[in-house]
Image: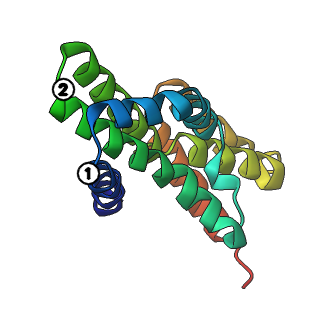
């Protein structure tokens, strides 16, 4: 993931190098609002629910904004201001943090667990619920994954 992150960021940066700050800024003004909406929208998509055939959707949602970050980085490097650097770092760190977190994956697996055997296994459901409520979501998810592994009928 981190190599792809760097690669897409570099693609944006390299594509912006030949242009002046004014040209980059004009291009960003045109798509800035759309990119902001797309970035926020991508953060609302529970990517764990994508099917095997929809992996390209997850890939695009995760990596397309990086090109814009790379373009913006060239503007920040050529015409640095504290606010532009803070905005770039804040948006990139938010994006990276979100897409490297397992939030949606855990929530999706919890729903599948509860829909599948959660009602038949109250002791497991209780333990998973308590662990999740205590902020120990990874432990709860590990239990769910082990329970779900027994479902597999390939």
Residue 73 shows up from this direction: yes
Rate crowding at label 2 as few (under 14), some (14 to 19) or many (20 or more) other CA atoms within 10 Å: few
Tell me how far mark 1 sits from mark 2, CA to CA: 15 Å
Quadrant where the N terminus sits is bottom left
Q: Residue at x 82, y 49 (%)?
A: 115
Marking on residue 18: 1
Task: Between residue 90 and residue 108, name the one nearer to us.
Answer: 90
Task: Give the label, 1 or 2, closer to the camera.
Answer: 1
Q: Which quadrant would residue 128 be assigned to in this image?
A: top right
The residue carrying mark 2 is 79
Q: Residue at x 62, y 51 (%)?
A: 47
Up/down of 147 relative to 153, above or below: above
Q: Which quadrant would residue 81 be assigned to in this image?
A: top left
SS state under label 1:
loop
- Residue 140 image position (x, y, % from top left): 53, 43
Q: Residue at x 38, y 30 (%)?
A: 25
Rate crowding at label 1 as few (under 14), some (14 to 19) or many (20 or more) other CA atoms within 10 Å: few
Identify the image's colour scheme: rainbow, by chain, secondary structure or one colour.
rainbow
Decide if residue 92 is on the left or right side of residue 138.
left
Up/down of 3 relative to 129, above or below: below
Up/down of 151 relative to 106, above or below: below
């Amino acid at each position: 993931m981190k190599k792809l992150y760097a690669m897409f960021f570099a693609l944006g940066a390299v594509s912006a190098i030949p242009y002046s700050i004014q040209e980059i800024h004009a291009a960003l003004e045109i798509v800035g609002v759309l990119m902001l909406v797309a970035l926020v929208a991508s953060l609302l998509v529970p990517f764990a629910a994508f099917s095997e055939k929809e992996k390209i959707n997850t890939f695009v949602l995760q990596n397309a904004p990086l090109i814009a970050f790379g373009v913006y980085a060239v503007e920040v490097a050529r015409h640095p201001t504290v606010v532009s650097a803070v905005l770039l770092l804040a948006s990139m760190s938010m994006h990276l943090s979100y897409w490297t977190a397992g939030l949606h994956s855990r929530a999706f697996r919890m729903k599948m667990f509860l829909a599948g055997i959660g009602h038949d296994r109250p002791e497991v459901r209780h333990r998973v619920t308590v662990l999740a409520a205590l902020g120990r979501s990874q432990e709860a998810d590990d239990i769910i994954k082990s329970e779900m592994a027994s479902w597999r009928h390939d």
